């Protein structure tokens, strides 16, 4: 391999097929004059553009069919010509410098073109170099060299993460791996589970309970998750009414008065609230507006007046003190009820964190645009993060996540995308250049993931995500099973 050209932080390196280089591989360029090595990553492999090559190829293809006789090549140049025709140009991005075997981001120097040696730098060695004591390893999968790839749970602490990729590429699978990894180290995790996919994390594939069984708590709104009005803060209630049920301003003011009236009488129950709205002296339109919202609260089945039915999040968090996950099962919950439940949960979370009743939580949100209101997005990356809510967004539609979230994301786990628009959206992530994202993510095989950000110290790496023995329930239910397909006989010929 030879160094050819540098433009910005892109290097072009000449190579040949027998070097066996692929996209995503790391190369190290060693300049013997200085005690430094440049770390680069191959983001694209192209044919080398040699002058006169087109003419040579054309000449070859026109003579192939119609010229008979023996090749006369006394100087044996044809093998050299073939060699040149097959030459590759590797497009590489400069990622850092290895100085005294320590990686740094200083790339203000240039190695010699004539004297540098270039060789492959295995991901395993790179991981060993950037490893500053992976004391809380989460085993994600394996590198190209088949060695285990782990990330440090510390690098997920206090961070904002995104898991994204095309439909069915394994996003939820990877998220579950992260959830279980965090539980292992005693973290509290909340999953907003849109499809009820995380509910069986406590079971192995053969249906038996696994080691996580006592640590995974599934909360189904309306079934084992019902709350009483008495434990509800006025602020959270108003958020539910305004944001989930779209109560207008005038009615909100009236509701505030009703709530305070009930609180003074210590009568915060659903029944009393209904009675108070009915008998409250106010404009008829306001009463109607309040009553319709009251009915929505009632119909959600999420609130109860029966003391034995009501549960509190304090209890749940108590159970996860030594590590555990609360899976908020939002499957079969209507979109309005979903917003009520999420609004309540996040409100309660901030309240408990504010009172230091819990230390911090890792929040996993699948397809968050379906239940998270507009203003929460900014809240999550700024205010809530300081309170100790560390969010991971999981989505197959990257454009549903705002651009500022991408820019502030600390880690991105990127699975395959082929759509240009989706790639364009993800490539806005500030932690890596857009060419890397577009080129590598486009060709990622199934179950492979490009890891970007803090967990890999900004050295993007391709990883094959491992399988694990947990009921992941991610399969799409199909109509044509192989059994039916084998039996069927087409009638129409
Ligand atoms: N690394 C892997 N090893 C083995 N099986 C995997 C892996 N990744 C995903 N799967 C399996 O592939 C299927 C789809 O994965 P998953 O549900 O995680 O995809 P997804 O990207 O979340 O899909 P969707 O866009 O529908 O939410 C699941 O049955 C899952 O168990
Ligand atoms: Mg999924």
Image (cartoon, grey):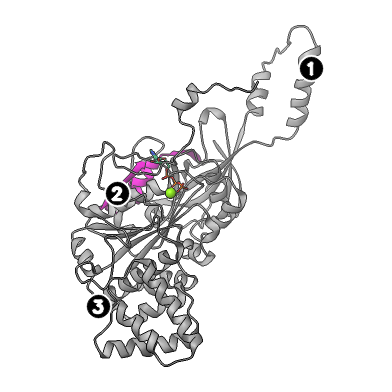
For disc 2, the marked residue is 138
- Whether residue 128 is visible to the viewer of this picture, yes or no, is yes
Answer with left or right where residue 431 lies relative to residue 264: right
Residue 355, labelled with which disc?
Answer: 3
Q: CA distance from mark 3 to mark 1?
A: 83 Å
Q: Nearer the viewer, residue 302 or 470?
A: 302
Nearer the camera: disc 3 or disc 1: 3
Check residue 61 for magenta coloring: no
* Image: magenta residue range: 117-141
For disc 1, the marked residue is 63
* Circle 1: element type: helix
Based on the displayed image, in which of its 4 quarters is residue 264 positioned?
A: bottom left
* Circle 2: element type: strand
Quadrant where the image shows the N terminus: top right
Q: Nearer the viewer, residue 331 or 420?
A: 331
Check residue 134 for magenta coloring: yes
Answer with left or right where residue 49 lies relative to residue 68: left
Task: Point out the tag, 2 or 3, that comes first from the N-terminus.
Answer: 2
Task: Point out the tag, 3 or 1, that comes first from the N-terminus.
Answer: 1
């Amino acid at each position: 391999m030879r160094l050819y050209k540098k433009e910005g932080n892109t290097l072009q390196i000449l190579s040949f097929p027998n070097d066996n280089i692929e996209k995503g591989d790391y190369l190290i360029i060693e300049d013997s004059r200085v005690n430094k090595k440049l770390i680069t990553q191959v983001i694209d492999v192209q044919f080398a553009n040699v002058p006169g090559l087109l003419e040579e190829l054309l000449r070859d293809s026109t003579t192939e069919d119609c010229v008979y006789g023996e090749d006369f090549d006394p100087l044996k140049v044809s093998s050299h010509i073939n060699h040149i025709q097959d030459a590759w140009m590797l497009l590489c991005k400069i990622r850092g410098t290895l100085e005294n075997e320590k990686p740094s981001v200083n790339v203000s120097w240039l190695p010699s073109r004539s004297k540098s040696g270039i060789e492959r730098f295995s991901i395993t060695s790179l991981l060993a170099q950037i490893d500053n004591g992976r004391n809380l390893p989460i085993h994600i999968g394996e590198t190209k060299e088949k060695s285990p790839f782990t990330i440090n749970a510390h690098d997920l602490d206090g961070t904002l993460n995104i898991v994204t990729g095309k439909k069915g590429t394994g996003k939820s699978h990877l998220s579950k791996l992260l959830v279980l990894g965090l539980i292992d180290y005693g973290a509290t995790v909340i999953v907003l589970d849109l499809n009820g996919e995380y509910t069986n994390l406590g079971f192995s594939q053969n249906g038996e309970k696994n080691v996580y069984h006592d640590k995974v708590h599934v909360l189904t709104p309306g079934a084992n998750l019902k709350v009483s009005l008495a434990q509800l803060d006025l602020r959270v209630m108003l958020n539910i009414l305004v944001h989930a049920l779209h109560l207008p301003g005038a009615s909100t003011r009236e509701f505030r008065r009703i709530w305070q009236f009930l609180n003074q009488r210590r009568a915060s129950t659903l029944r009393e609230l209904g009675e108070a709205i009915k008998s409250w002296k106010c404009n008829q339109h306001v009463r109607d507006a309040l009553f319709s919202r009251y009915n929505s609260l009632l119909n959600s089945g999420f609130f109860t007046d029966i003391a034995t039915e009501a549960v509190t999040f304090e209890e749940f968090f108590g159970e996860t003190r030594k590590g555990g996950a609360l899976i908020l099962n939002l499957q079969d919950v209507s979109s309005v009820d979903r917003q009520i439940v999420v609004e309540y949960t996040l409100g309660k979370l901030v309240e408990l964190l504010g009172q230091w009743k819990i230390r911090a939580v890792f929040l996993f949100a699948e397809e968050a645009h379906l239940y998270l209101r507009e203003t929460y997005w900014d809240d999550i990356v700024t205010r809530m993060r300081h309170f100790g809510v560390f969010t991971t967004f999981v989505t197959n539609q990257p454009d549903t996540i705002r651009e500022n979230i991408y820019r502030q994301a600390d880690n991105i786990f990127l699975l395959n995308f082929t759509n240009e628009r989706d790639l364009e959206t993800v490539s806005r992530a500030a932690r890596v250049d857009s060419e890397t994202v577009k080129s590598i993510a486009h060709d990622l095989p199934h179950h492979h993931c490009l890891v970007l950000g803090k967990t890999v110290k900004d050295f993007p790496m391709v990883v094959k995500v491992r399988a694990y023995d947990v009921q992941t329930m991610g399969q799409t239910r199909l109509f044509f099973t192989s059994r039916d397909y084998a039996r069927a006989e087409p009638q129409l010929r």
